[in-house]
Amino acid sequence: MLRCANYNLTIAKLLDRSASVREFACGHCSVKFQPDSLDGVNTITRHDGARLWVGHQIHHGNLIVPWSGPVRRWDPVDFGALTQVHFDELLQLNPELVIFGSGARLRFAPPALVRNLIAQRIGVESMDTAAACRTYNVLVSERRSVVAALLLEAA
């Protein structure tokens, strides 16, 4: 059985402003290969507003996506229904960072709602859900213990 894996390729030119295009083409750059998926790590593979794919599995509704383990539904109906209890639920996962995806547009959770996360020295970053998905993937590819708390809604 043939098994294939996809890899992301990143090429970065060294920060040498005096280097010519010819030098860049001749190998004065760094190359980094990263697998598209990591064993045992949840990777968000697609997001279209109301749906989210983690690996090959499709999910509907608001979600908690931990770096590993099961993806689970998140109870708030929408941004306006968020409470401290919703964010305190994330403490059970013991992340180093929470990425809060606020829906189709950037909205910040009121500080009182994330107070207990901050008191436990857990970072909290807010962004729109599409940006949260991208940021989450970068962090899990670095093997960080991150949790995405995502509000899914159509743009």
Image (tube, grey):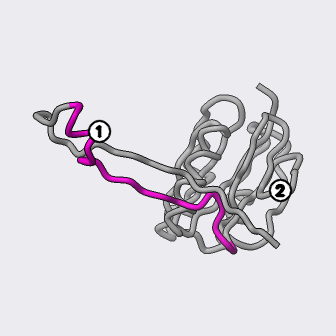
Query: Whole-percent x and y of residue 136?
Result: 59, 53
Percent from the top left, x then y, of residue 119?
49, 66
Distance in Å between CA atoms under marks 1 and 2: 37 Å
Horizontal arrangement in the rendering, residue 123 relative to residue 15 (left or right): right
| Amino acid found under the numbered disc labelled 1 | Ala
Location of the C terminus (image quadrant): top right
Mark 1 lies on residue: 25
Q: Mark 2, residues whose alpha carbon is within 10 Å: few (<14), some, or many (≥20)?
A: few
Question: Is the residue under label 2 in contact with that under label 1 (CB below 8 Å)?
Answer: no
Nearer the camera: disc 1 or disc 2: 1
Q: Is residue 116 visible?
A: no
User: Going 75% across and 73% down the picture, which residue do you hit?
Assistant: 69
Direction left: furthest residue:
18
In the structure shown, which secondary structural element does the residue marked by tag 1 occupy? Answer: helix
35 lies left or right of 27 = right
Residue 120 appearing in the image: yes
| Foreground of the two, 101 or 55 | 55
Q: Amino acid at mark 2?
A: His
| Magenta residue span | 21-40
Which residue is at 52% across, 49% downward?
125
Q: Quadrant of residue 12?
A: top left
Q: Residue at x 87, y 46 (%)?
A: 61
Q: In the rendered image, which residue does mark 2 sit on?
A: 56
Residue toward you, 47 or 22: 22
The answer to whether residue 44 is above or below residue 3 is above
Q: Relative to 48, does residue 137 appear above or below in the rendering?
A: below
**Number of numbered markers:** 2
Q: Position of residue 148 (x, y in %)?
A: 66, 55
Quarter where residue 68 is shown: bottom right
- CA neighbours of label 1 inside 10 A, class few (<14), some (14 to 19), many (20+): few
